[in-house]
Image (spheres, rainbow, N blue to C red):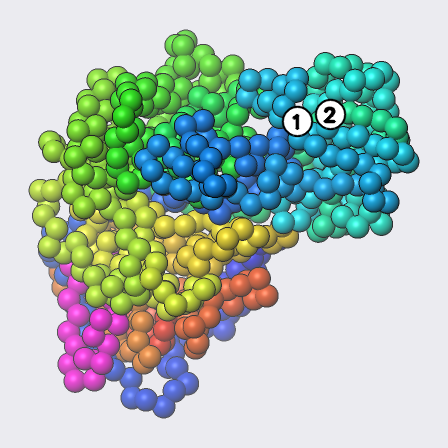
Amino acid sequence: MLSVLSKWNRTLVIGAALAAGMAVLFADSVGEAAPSVHVIINTAAHGQRENPHMWGLFIENICNDVDGGLYAQMIQNPDFKNDVPPADCKVVNGKWLSPDGQLHPPPRGGPMLAWRPVALRPHQVSLRVVSTTPLSAAHQLSLRVQVAAGSAGVGNIGYWGMPLQAGRQYLVTFYARTSGKNLPVTVALTNTRLTQRYARHSVEINSPHWHKYQMKLLSTGDSHQGMLAFTARGPAKFYVTLAQMFPISRHTDKPEFFRHDIVALLSRLHPGFLRFPGGNFIEGISLADSYNWRKTVGPMIDRPGHMNFWGYRNTDGFGFMGWLRLTRRLHTEPMYCTSAGLLWNAQTLKGTHLSVYIRRMLSAVGFANDPASTHWGNLRARFGHPQPFGIKYVEIGNENGGPSYHRNYPIMEAALHKAFPSVIPIADDWGSVPPGHLQIIDQHFYPSKKWFRYHANQYDSYPESGPKVLVGEYAVGASHSHYGDFRMTLAETAFMIGMERNCSKVILASYGVTLDNAGASRAHINLIQFNDRIAFGRSMYWVQYLFNHEQPATVFPTTIIRNGPGRMVQHRLFVDAGLTARGHHMIIKVDNASAYPVTGNFLLRGSARFTGSGVAYTLHTMNPGIDNNFRHPDRIVPMRSIFTAHGVNLSYRFKRYSITVLRVNTQE
């Protein structure tokens, strides 16, 4: 798998070499007279302390970003349950009727999604999903493979392509049985056209009872359209279910749980926290399939999976432990989001027992936080992690509001505080907030580009005495762009600057969609896009990178004075500034969303002074209607430049359609 991280490092070196010794950069090659603005940075005023963990990540399984992406398991629909409806849904005219009266289309592909016959001639093999002799209570379906003559069987093509690499080993496990005795079955890696075979291994199925088979397959060739095939020589009949396939690390010789290139991109951000597992994902399309952490840990044979709110089935192979392990891998704080016993539209259904959801919440936190000597801590230790993970935040509900939520939240919050007084509860602000004293509220924004620019000062008037704010999801949602572009990034960055200017009120923020699998239904808003071959950061990814890596400890008031031509950039130029913890560096962030290069004349008030060299990181494109894509994954990345500044004044020219972060040496 490839990423653009190495290209980003080369860009920094080249940019620094080109710009060395230059004091003020750099006019655009356009003929217009550049507007000029004055910016006063008042370091004598009382600054706002910024939470060092302010900028985090939000990941949910929304477009096969976990199953089929972050989770390295390569078999899609391993247990043939793709179109099994939730237990509390009825099938009406081919659709699923949930208890709240909503109709939902079942996932496409039926029970044989991603599986296909492996045969050279028609009618050589028949395939049928059956429920006889279940593997377990969690997995009651299997595939009957009946071969009439010759060598034939069934294969799985993975998620929008199964990438195979020459010299790479893959761990394959599956359950199988046969009604006969001593049936040889060949397990092979092939291409989908069956013209190439890259690996094979023979097993003997010799029992009517289920048996687990495990093997390593070494691929001798490369293919982005690979297939895992099970074949036998007919006449023969066998049953198979719960097949899994993981790439094996070349370094540790162990199966890879995470897809390493995606994790590398996430890790490079240095996120302050991870909000998981949703999102609407926690609610499901019905309460019977709302997220239940307990069904996502332990052996796969005991994990039933569940229907995802976003229209496809989740294997839950990643599971609750996967999220917790990811926070440890990223060295970030866990923020767990739990169901408030409501569906997304905040209805309480007849027969709902809130105590069920309270137990789920408390047991999840106990599993993550309790010492290994306790019941839940001991279970975590048995699964290979004796040390607690330390969930710091628990959000109760997601995008819930109204009377039902306002009734449920105080009850659940009180139970959480009694059991885990150090864990910080978060309440939803979805049109209104629950009654009582609230520590943190979660607000979500998916409006237009114009809204973000015109509401960059959203929190200027928010009361200091109010609850602290988590902006758990924000992104341009109303857009004519099917893919997303740099104009959206400019608008979203304006809002981020506004949040940072008010960092005593907004203490946590995470972007709306982090991962996007190009094979699934594409989201035009995302930080990282990937397919089976490459993962790369979009322009907003690099904004998140800069905000995390160039973060002040204290943010000071800034005033923009626009005179004459400077008025041309009204609602198009956004600035904030602050000092690092020891006061040795001033961090200035400038978003120039206008069509003009803008000269910024900065004036320090107070005791701080610029003392020499500075570094500028600039995201810029002459065409804001584009963004990074699979053909050009690194065309918008930060460019590094050097400049100098002395005393209380700094003059800098900002390119049109640019986002710039200045780090300037200072002393107080």
Residue 258: say if magenta: no
Disc 2 on helix, strand or loop?
Answer: strand
Quarter location, residue 302? top right
Q: Relative to 210, is 386 on the left or the right?
A: left
Dots 1, 2 in contact, CB < 8 A: yes
Q: Quick one: label 1 or label 2, which is nearer the N terminus?
A: 1
Identity, as a three-letter code, of the amino acid under mark 1: Val
Q: Relative to 356, is 566 on the left or the right?
A: left
Identity, as a three-letter code, of the amino acid under mark 2: Tyr
Question: Percent from the top left, x then y, of residue 307?
Answer: 47, 35
At 22% from the left and 61% from the top, the residue drawn is 456
Residue at image mark 1: 130
Question: Percent from the top left, x then y, of residue 567?
Answer: 18, 80
Residue at image mark 2: 239
Q: Which residues are magenta?
A: 556-578
Question: Is residue 297 positioned above or below 499 on the image?
Answer: above
